[in-house]
Image (cartoon, grey):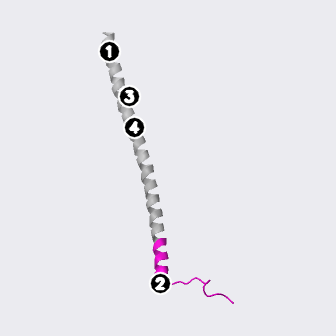
Amino acid sequence: MNDPREAPFECAPGLRLAAHERVSQIQNDNICRRLDRLEEMMERLERRLWLTVYGVVAVILTQALQSMLVAGGH
């Protein structure tokens, strides 16, 4: 016959621990997904910031070049 020692024994504390582990894993997965989304948003924000910086520098250089051309033409 079957040996009773081979059958898994499930008790309330063991089931509670398994449920807690599942909930913890789900929460951890959600936190990881949120962190991934935050990282993507930060990368997009960084790209926008650099584009703004380059745009401002381009405007300043263009104005300086125009003023030099105007001053040189007179």
Q: Residue at x 46, y 71 (%)?
A: 23
In magenta stretch: residue 5: yes
Q: Residue at x 53, y 83 (%)?
A: 10
Q: Residues within 10 Å of mark 4 (few under 14, many from 20)?
A: few
Q: CA distance from mark 4 to mark 2?
A: 57 Å
Disc number at residue 58?
Answer: 3
Image vertical order of residue 69 relative to residue 35, above or below: above
Residue of label 4? 50
Q: Secondary structure at mark 2?
A: helix
* Precedes in sequence: disc 3 or disc 1: 3
Q: Amino acid at mark 2?
A: Ala
Please tell me whether mark 4 or mark 2 is closer to you in this view: 2
Q: Residue at x 32, y 15 (%)?
A: 70
Disc number at residue 41?
Answer: none
Q: CA distance from mark 3 to mark 1?
A: 18 Å
Q: CA distance from mark 3 to mark 4?
A: 12 Å
The magenta stretch is: 1-22
Residue of label 1? 70
> In x, y percent, where is residue 74?
30, 9
Left or right for 62, reference 36 = left
Please tell me whether mark 2 or mark 1 is closer to you in this view: 2
Q: Secondary structure at mark 1?
A: helix
Q: Secondary structure at mark 3?
A: helix
